[in-house]
Image (cartoon, coloured by chain):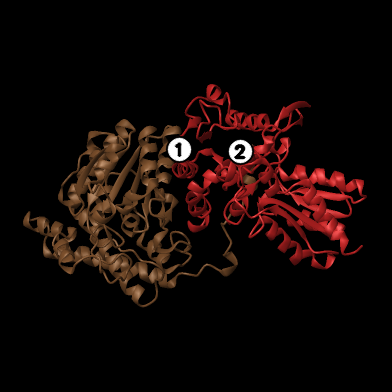
Chain colours: A red, B brown
Amino acid sequence: MSTTTYREAVRTALRDVLEREPRAFLMGEDVGRYGGCYACSKGLLDEFGPARVRDTPLSEAAFVGAGIGAALGGMLPIVEIMTVNFSLLALDQIVNNAATIRHMSGGQFSIPLVIRMATGAGRQVAAQHSHSLEGWYAHVPGIRVVAPATLADARGMLWTALADPDPVVIFEHAMLYSLEGELPENAGAVDIDRAAVRRPGRDVTVIAYSASLYKALEAAGRLAADEIEAEVIDLRSLRPLDDATIMASVRKTRRAVVVDEGWRSGSLAAELSARIMEQAFYDLDAPVGRVCTEEVPIPYPKHLEDAALPQPEKIVAAVKALFGAHG
Amino acid sequence: MTKHAEKTHLDRDHLLLLLKEMLRIRRFEERCVELYSTGKIRGFLHLYIGEEANAVGVMQALTADDAVVTTYREHGHALARGISARALMAEMYGKREGSSRGRGGSMHVFDAATRFYGGNAIVAGGIPLAVGLALADKMRGRKLLTACFLGDGAAAEGLFHESLNLAALWQLPVLFVCENNLYAMGTAIARAHSQTDLTKYAESHAIAAEAVDGMDVVAVEVAARRAAALVRETGAPYFLENRTYRFRAHSMYDPELYRSKAEVEEWKKRDPIPALEAWLASAGLLHADELARIEAAVAAEVDDAVAFSEAGEWEPIEDLAKDVMTPQRTLRREEAA
């Protein structure tokens, strides 16, 4: 085991892929000489050269589209977009091309493309750099969407995503890059299909993903002091959703709260809530609770940003509300 | 590329081939109009009638391994590229024997065998795919080019400019073919572009460009062969603006309020098919019986395509979700591991 960071884990994953897979290359804004806007690719230009660590102009639509084309042409591109807000400039290419071409061509063409982007709030960068729009991507058939929350997943999901024949979008929460932790020296590829139980519990299932996982775990710790044992699930894959793991937990605990940094309306939390109702309604002792971001553009000042986002105390309150009805 | 490929050989056989290729597209689409009227073909149907010289001329300059990316007005490109009339017509019918198993229809023709990457119905949406295909060929050390067809309407999209910049910046072997038919749906070029000489856009992105008469198949072929040879030799992109005209509505029927009948009639005088026929006849290279023989062969091919499509099968509803994602996912993973 060695102490490392989420950022280092992403960089190690990128280096590993570039070393072992000659068709892989990284492209995006400032991934080369600058070292990546979150320093994820620092040093890789020197190691792999400008053809494989490729700085692009500020042309999200064109370089994402070029990534799709390069994947069609037999390469394995990893395209980095600085933030999910900027990815809207490339949404046409992702939704209209990457997600459709396999089906629309009658299965003739696969697009083994990986798109990585930062998501999420917490750095006081206001409403054009802070949103969590991964739920929009998770709406779209034809792509996989994953959200590594742990160091092991930051290290291991990239390989599996790149080996996948279909487009995979990886969301890295901006607040996680500096997360420190232990990672085994031989850490490697991990699955990108299944949700993981990060804390076992018997009384309530708290479903979270990405940086919200840590808020859910903190809430679970506080709830334990009140003798409520929360089981915390890390979704890991946002599309497809691992219904089996989620329902097994909910059937056991009979209560569920979904934590989602996206807005409540039309959210992943809404989808999860609906699925639990469809598949486990008669196992529930209380309605499904949701803790989502308030329906405002993320504001700049810290107190307002904090107020807009899911927080451990909101999760604690949402869980306790499920028990209130039954004393 | 050799000098041989760069040159256009204007012998009789080749000229008759050009004529036949244009007639195949014309007669195929005329039949599509009939089939649309009887409900056999639905959805949008964007006809290429009047513009045939462009697809036929440009395709002469491509090798079998080059890639093609095109637009939603792509029946001509598909036929001229070598996709069979059967597969194309079956796609129009929405039958599983179609080039895209019927999933795409008129606007989304794909064919792996000829490296034909669609049929893209988002204006300018295919352009960066062409840039990426050329990037892949370059990174893999393959001396191939990607032909990227687009229209004058696409030149107003940001993605057009972003993609041209990228192709020039990275020196990628893309042959851009802008089929300027003067209208983006119903918007005349002068009402949409501050610069109506579209070669200037390419030049401003440091891409060599020239305009060519898109109503003259020989002129198109000569320009395309020269351009393709340059792209292969230099690895850099090249931009052709083919000045052309569509004789029919934007998509099957529209009231054509945006242009006058007189204008359309004026352009029809430059119809590339009778023009080539007249030229061949005046040079003593085409006799009436020869033309009749070509027309009969084309008619038989179209009849056969229709019969094939009529006899085709519908994709079973159970296969609705097939190929949304790759089924043999683990195979690729093992291969890469």
Secondary element under disc 2, as helix, strand or loop, is helix
Q: Is residue A184 above or below residue B102?
A: above
Task: Give the residue furthest to the top.
Answer: A46
Give the label on residue B155, or none.
Answer: none
Residue nearer the viewer, A72 or B291 = A72
Residue named by callout 1: A58
Mark 2, chain letter? B
Q: Residues within 10 Å of mark 1 (few under 14, many from 20)?
A: some
Secondary element under disc 1, as helix, strand or loop, is loop
- In the rendered image, is residue B201 in sight? yes
Q: In this view, does A207 lie above or below A19?
A: below
Residue B294 at x, y = what percent?
Answer: 21, 62
Task: Give the residue furthest to the bottom.
Answer: B38
Left of A190 or right of it: where is B56? left
Left of A200 or right of it: where is B275? left
Q: Residue at x 22, y 65 (%)?
A: B259
Left of A85 or right of it: where is B82? left
Residue named by callout 2: B336
Left of B189 or right of it: where is A148? right
Q: Residues within 10 Å of mark 2 (few under 14, many from 20)?
A: some
Residue A74 at x, y = what percent?
Answer: 49, 40
Residue nearer the viewer, B186 or B57 = B186
